[in-house]
Image (cartoon, rainbow, N blue to C red):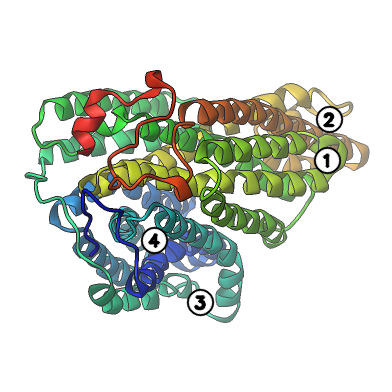
């Protein structure tokens, strides 16, 4: 492992670290492939296992529930027992659970294995990012390494539908789960050789009460938001969110009192980390909601099959990879704040283009999504790099877990809030097409999916009128969400340009050890609070 000296520049990574990065990229690639493949496998496995609609939802959702709930705990646990050790434990558990899931004999068994996969997955991402943080101490190299890591995630999203299509065409549904086993075996073999161990030597004991409270805060919020997105406003979903928020307040109060907290709240006192996380969460909210609507648009409005819709989404994933690799390269000469602001502004133009789908159809959506993805890619890898470099090395696992938890919450919030906004606009614009019976109109008001079904059951002109009205209304809802997203992205560009402007380009970065923020240039008011210094020294 690299060592840092207080008087000299950080050590540069060697070939061993770069090969180790390739090993760390495997879990990232796998996790994103695994999610997208399961969507394709769901119909077949549900048929063979006899899973009803409720069980299908749990098969899909239990993974993200458990993953989000345990990210904070696993990130902190890695800081305590060692990030490499936790990574290898998680890899072994993920591989074993994947085999068990592939050969599941009932829906209940598959749900249980998916939960175990979520638990194992919660160990992987924080550990990989924390190890990267400690392996690459040079700012330029760290930015490149994180860009590679982020690109692997997006690359997995691109490869998932293609790999899944090949597997499910030639093999049974369980092959979708076995796909990850060779990756985990390679990680278990190469990890101990290539990856250095790192931990916080003064982390203290793990507070089990805080672990329970973190689960009690995150799980109900994620469950409630997913339920709201799927079923609309219901008392149990609202209650779940309220309970989660209340427990979250209790969790925060306890962390403030503990000498060795599960989550060191002083991380949020660092302005760079705070602004970066805000941008990450808001980006997740907008893009999760819009991506959902764009996918539904292609299938329900344009009539594409799921596979054809997936193919049309590939260009945006490629654009995201290009942006995520270009961001760190540009940051060697240009201040990150300007790159991030420029990328977010470009993304705003992309969203404004999507808002024109009513006039330009598929072209507006595809071009808009590509431009948006390219714009988002520029700041995303930089945000990860800024958070990880500003966090102290001993808190790398905690910082990584906070980012990942924020991402999960952003996705859930985006689907729940912006998905709901799209639905509200859809219902308002649907109106009452001439000749459509009341019962068909009532069904159509539920969603565009039910509208398409109802239109298919109506004769001639009535069916065509309902279908046209529903498609126009849904397009209007998507345009409204894209318009709102445009405003949000412009505001985020301003936030990045103003709050992060003191961070130098990595080519001009001072030689302080990572974790000790450089003094901002020419703006005393933008200096970090004293508690940041206490945290990062």
**Residue position marked by numbered label 3 in the rendering:** 172
Query: In this figure, which residue is indicated by the disc labeled 1?
Result: 458
Query: Which of pointers 2 and 1 lies earlier in the amino acid sequence?
Result: 2
Identify the residue at horizontal 29%, vertical 59% (top origin): 131
Q: Earlier in the sequence, mark 3 or mark 1?
A: 3
Distance from label 3 to label 4 (Cα)?
A: 16 Å
Regarding mark 3 in the picture, which secondary structure is present there?
loop
- Mark 4 neighbour class, 10 Å CA radius: few under 14, some 14 to 19, many 20 or more: many
Position of the N terminus by quadrant: bottom left
C-alpha span from label 2 to label 3 = 44 Å
Kindly tell me whether residue 440 is visible in this rendering.
Answer: no
The outermost residue toward the top is: 525
Determine which residue is flagged by label 2.
Answer: 436
Q: Residue at x 52, y 59 (%)?
A: 151
Task: Return the x and y of residue 459 as percentages of the image width and height.
Answer: 88, 42
Residue 453 higher or lower than 282, as above or below: below
Q: Residues within 10 Å of mark 3 (few under 14, many from 20)?
A: few
How far, Cα to Cα, is label 3 from label 1? 38 Å
The mark that comes first in sequence, 3 or 4, is 4
Q: Decide: marks 2, 1 in contact (CB < 8 A)?
A: yes
Q: Which residue shows up at 25% across the image and 43% down it?
A: 392
Image depth: mark 3 or mark 4 in front: 3
Comparing 138 with 377, the one in front is: 138
């Amino acid at each position: 492992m690299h060592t840092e000296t207080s008087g000299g520049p950080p050590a540069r990574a060697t070939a061993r670290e770069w090969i180790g990065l390739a090993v760390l990229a495997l879990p990232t690639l796998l996790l994103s492939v695994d999610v997208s493949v399961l969507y394709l496998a769901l119909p077949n496995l549900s048929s063979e296992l006899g899973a009803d609609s409720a069980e299908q939802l749990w098969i899909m959702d239990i993974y993200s529930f458990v993953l989000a709930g345990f990210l904070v705990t696993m990130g902190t646990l890695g800081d305590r027992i060692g990030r490499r050790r936790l990574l290898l434990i998680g890899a072994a558990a993920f591989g074993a659970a994947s085999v068990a899931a592939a050969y599941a004999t009932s829906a209940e068994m598959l749900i249980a294995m998916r939960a175990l996969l979520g638990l194992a997955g919660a160990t992987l991402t924080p550990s990989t990012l924390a190890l990267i943080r400690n392996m690459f101490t040079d700012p330029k190299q760290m930015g490149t390494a994180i860009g590679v890591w982020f690109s692997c995630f997006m690359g997995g999203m691109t490869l998932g539908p293609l790999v899944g299509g090949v597997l499910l065409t030639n093999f049974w549904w369980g092959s979708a789960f076995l796909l990850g086993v060779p990756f985990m075996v390679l990680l278990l073999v190469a990890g101990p050789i290539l990856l250095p161990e790192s931990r916080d030597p003064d982390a203290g004991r793990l507070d089990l009460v805080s672990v329970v409270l973190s689960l009690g805060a995150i799980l109900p919020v994620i469950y409630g938001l997913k339920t709201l997105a799927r079923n609309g406003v219901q008392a149990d979903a609202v209650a779940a969110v309220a309970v989660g928020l209340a427990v979250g307040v209790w969790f925060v109060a306890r962390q403030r009192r503990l000498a060795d907290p599960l989550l060191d709240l002083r991380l949020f006192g660092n302005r760079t980390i705070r602004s970066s996380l805000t941008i990450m969460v808001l980006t997740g909210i907008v893009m999760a909601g819009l991506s959902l609507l764009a996918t539904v648009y292609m299938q329900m409005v344009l009539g594409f099959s799921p596979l054809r819709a997936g193919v049309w989404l590939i260009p945006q994933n490629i654009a995201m990879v290009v942006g995520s690799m270009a961001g760190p390269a540009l940051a060697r000469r240009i201040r990150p704040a300007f790159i991030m602001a420029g990328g977010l502004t470009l993304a705003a133009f992309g969203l404004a283009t999507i808002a024109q789908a009513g006039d330009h159809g598929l072209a507006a959506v595809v071009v808009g999504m590509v431009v948006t993805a390219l714009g988002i890619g520029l700041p995303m890898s930089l945000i990860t790099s800024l958070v990880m470099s500003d966090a102290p090395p001993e808190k790398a696992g905690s910082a990584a877990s906070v980012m990942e938890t924020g991402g999960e919450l952003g996705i859930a919030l985006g689907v729940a809030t912006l998905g709901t906004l799209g639905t509200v606009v859809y219902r308002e614009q649907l109106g009452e097409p001439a000749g459509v019976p009341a019962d068909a109109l009532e069904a159509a008001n539920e969603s565009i999916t039910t509208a398409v079904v109802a239109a298919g059951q109506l004769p001639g002109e009535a069916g065509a009128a309902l279908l046209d009205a529903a498609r126009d209304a849904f397009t209007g809802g998507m345009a409204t969400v894209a318009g709102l997203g445009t405003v949000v992205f412009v505001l985020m560009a301003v936030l990045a340009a103003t709050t992060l402007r003191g961070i130098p380009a990595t080519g001009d970065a001072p030689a302080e050890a990572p974790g000790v923020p450089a003094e901002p240039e020419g703006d005393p008011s933008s200096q970090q609070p004293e508690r940041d210094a206490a945290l990062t020294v």
